[in-house]
Amino acid sequence: MSSTVSVDAVVDRALLDRLTDRVVARPRADRVATVAPFSGTPLAEVPLSTTDDVATAFAAARDAARWWAARPVAERARIIGHVHDLVLDRRAEIADLVQAEGGKARRDAFEEVADVALAARYVAVRGPRVLRERRRLGLLPGLTRAIEGHRPKGVVGVISPWNYPLTLAISDCLPAFVAGNAVVHKPDSQAMLTALLARSIAIEAGLPEALWQIVSGDGPVIGGAVVEHADYVSFTGSTATGRVVAARLGERLVGASLELGGKNPLIVLDDADLDRAAEAAVRACFSNAGQLCMSMERLYVAASVRDPFLERFLARVESMRVGPAFDYSCDMGSLMSQDQLDKVRAHVDDAVAKGARVLSGGRARPDLGPWFHEPTVLDGVRPGMLAADVETFGPVVSVYPVMSDDEAVELANDTPYGLNASVWTSDLRRGVALARRLRSGVVNVNEGYTAAWGSHDLPIGGMGASGLGRRHGREGILRYTEPQAIAVQRVHNLAPPAGLSYDTFTEAMAKSLRVLRRIGRA
Ligand code: NAD
C-alpha cells in the first residue's frame, strides 16, 4: 500500500536545529515538541516566544521596514524572483519537510511547491506594475493633476494555519515584501519547520533577515500579541478565530484580510462529462485528506445522472492508495493530529447515528499510522447532522441529488460560508451563468479548485463567514498598502478669482458642472 521510507530517513536533524534557532525567542526559552503525523513520533523541539519576544520582533521589523520601503520596487521584486528559482531547485528537500511535518501525500506537498513558484512569479513580475503610481482624473481637466500612490503599511502580521505549511507561510508574505513591508509571522505550532525553511530560502534569495521575523507559541497569546502590534494582519484559519482577530483589530482600526473556513459545494449538472467530473471530484474532496479550505464537502448531483456519476466516483475513491509514503505511490496521506481524527470520527459517527449511509470508507486506519482515515462518501446526510452543517475539514463528503439547476443553486447557497464552489457541465455558458448565482468568492467551472487558485491574477477569498478581503491578484498586493491621493493644482487657487463675486462664481461653476455631466466626464 505504501513505500516504507521513515521520517528519520528524509529529515536532516541538524537542519531542523539550525532552523528552530531562528525563532525569535529568549535563550533557553521553553520548547514545544512537534510531531510527525505519519508516525506520531517527535520531529523537533521549537522554542516558544513570549509576548516580549513578539514586541522585540516588531521593533526589529519596523527598523528594517523603513530601509526596505525606500529600496526600488524592482530590487524587491528581483529578490522574490530568486525565491521562485530556489523553491523549484530545492523542491525535493522542501517536499520532504512538508510531508514530515504535515503528514500529507507527496503530490499534495509538490502542489505547495508549485503554488509558491506561481505566487512568487506573479508577485515578482506584476508587483512593480501594480504598485506603480497612476494618474487619476483631477478636479479641473488640465489644471488639477491627480496621482494615486501606494505606501507600505509598515509591519504586517501574518498568522497562518497548519494545513498548507509552505503555501500559507510564504505566499502571503511575498506580496507584503514587494509592497515594501516587513513581516512578523506566527505560523501554527505544527507548521513551524516549513515556515522556517521557507524563510531561510527567502534569505538565501537576498531578503534581508530582519524583514521576516518568525515567532512561535499559543494562538491566543502569541497570535494575540501579533494582532496587538501589527499595522495590518493577514490571517488564515478558522472562522471562530477570525472573528476574535477582527474584533481586536476593530478596536485599533487596523485592517486585515481574513481567509477563513468553508463548506464548499460541487455541482454536477445533467450534461456534465461524468468521467472528468468524477475524477476531478476525487481531488477536490480528498486532496490533503480534505484538510484544504477549498475542498468540497457537499456534492449536488442532478438526479438524472446521480447513479452513473456515483458509479464512476465511488470506483475512483475505492481505488485511492492511502498511506505514509515519501514518494508518489500514495494518493492520500494522514490527518494532521488526534484532534483532526476525532473531528472526522465525530462527523461520520453523528451522520450514521442519525440515519446517513456510508457509501465508501468510513473507518479510521490505525494500521497505517495513528491519524489515518479512509476517504469517506456519505449518502442521506440531512440538516441537523454535523456533516451537513459544519466544516469537517477532513476526507468526508456528502452526496445529495438535485432536481434542477435552481435547486442546486439554492442548496449550494444554503450555508453561512462562501469560499469555493465547483460547477460541472458541457455547456460553458450555462456553467458561468450558474457560477454568477452562487454566493461564493471563488467558483471553478469544470475544475475543483486549482483553476481559480492557480490563476494568480484572480482575487481569491470568501464571502460571508468565509472571510474578508482577498489574497492573490492586484488585491492581494494592494491590501498591504495605504492608498495615497496626491493632487497638484496648477495656475490658480480653487476660489473665485479676485474681483469676481461669489454670485457670479457659483453661477459659472454650476454651468461648468452641467457641461461636464453632459459630455460624460466622470
Ligand atoms: P485556527 O483558527 O485554530 O488557527 C489558525 C492560526 O491562528 C494558528 O496559527 C493559531 O495559532 C492562530 N490563533 C489561534 N487563536 C488565535 C487568536 N485568538 N488570536 C490570534 N491568532 C490565533 O485554525 P486551524 O484549525 O489551524 O486551521 C483550520 C481552519 O483554517 C479551517 O477552518 C480552514 O478552512 C481554515 N483555512 C482557511 C483558508 C483560506 O484560505 N480561507 C486556508 C487554510 C485554512
Image: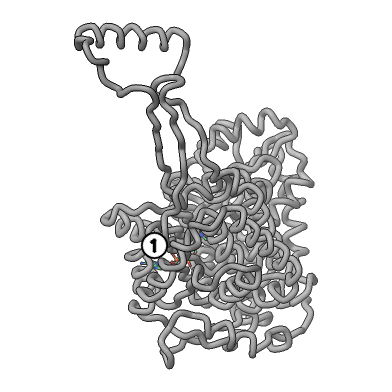
Residue located at (45% from left, 53% from top): 152
Q: How far from the left and from the top, in percent, is residue 9?
A: 73, 87
Residue placed most toward the observer, 325 or 185: 185
Image vertical order of residue 303 relative to residue 119, above or below: above
Amino acid of disc 1: Thr
Q: Would you say 264 lies left or right of 204 here?
A: left
Q: How far from the left and from the top, in percent, is residue 435?
A: 59, 35
Q: According to the image, label 1 marks what residue? A: 241
The local secondary structure at tag 1 comes to helix
Image vertical order of residue 499 relative to residue 459, above or below: above
Q: How far from the left and from the top, in percent, is residue 375?
A: 66, 64
Rendered-image quadrant of the N terminus? bottom right
Residue located at (69% from left, 51% from top): 281
Q: How far from the left and from the top, in percent, is residue 426?
A: 75, 34
Q: In which quarter of the image is residue 407?
A: top right
Residue behind label 1 places its C-beta within 8 angstroms of ligand 1: yes
Q: Quadrant of residue 229?
A: bottom left
Q: Would you say 406 lies left or right of 272 here?
A: left
- Asked whether residue 320 appears in the rendered view, the answer is yes
